[in-house]
Image (cartoon, rainbow, N blue to C red):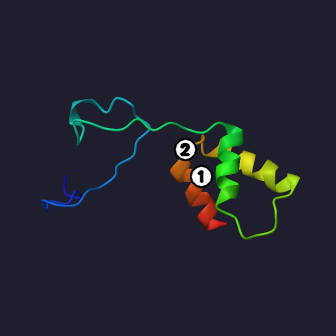
Amino acid sequence: MKNIPTTGHGSIVITSRNAYPGRDALSTSGLQATTFGVEQGAEFFLHFLTGLAPPTEEDRDAAKVISQRYDGVPPAIRQAAYIV
């Protein structure tokens, strides 16, 4: 594993959609993250756009599309909001 840090301190986060990485897993433990539903993901997305004008219905519809496109995965939705 040439890309994994070898120092004795710090931590890294590795994400995967594979719930069963098998015996080649890098860790013996993990955290099962949950995903948002479409509405909750859209609200999460819009939350990061505070300070702008209040969202229109068109904005809310677009946020729902983004939430669906990223399967409700919170880090992906947050990253999309930062790009906007």
Amino acid at pointer 1 = Ile
Q: Which mark is residue 77?
A: 1
Element assignment for label 2: loop
Q: Quadrant of the C terminus?
A: bottom right
- Residue found 81% across the figure and 56% down from its top: 59
Displayed quadrant of residue 41:
top right
Q: Residue furthest right?
A: 57
Element assignment for label 1: helix
Q: Residue furthest bottom?
A: 51
Looking at the image, residue 8 sits to the left or right of residue 71; the answer is left
C-alpha gap between disc 1 and disc 2: 6 Å
Displayed quadrant of residue 24:
top left
Establish if 83 lies above or below 26: below
Mark 1, residues whose alpha carbon is within 10 Å: few (<14), some, or many (≥20)?
Answer: many
- Residue found 39% across the figure and 46% down from its top: 15
Query: How many numbered circles does the render carry?
Result: 2
Amino acid at pointer 2 = Val
Q: Position of residue 63 (x, y in %)?
A: 73, 51
Q: Position of residue 7 (x, y in %)?
A: 14, 62
Q: Position of residue 1 (x, y in %)?
A: 19, 52
Q: Which mark is residue 73?
A: 2
Establish if 9 lies above or below 66: below
Q: Are marks 1 and 2 in contact (CB under 8 Å)?
A: yes
Looking at the image, residue 46 sits to the left or right of residue 22; the answer is right
Q: Position of residue 61 (x, y in %)?
A: 81, 48
Looking at the image, residue 1 sits to the left or right of residue 41; the answer is left
Mark 2, residues whose alpha carbon is within 10 Å: few (<14), some, or many (≥20)?
Answer: some
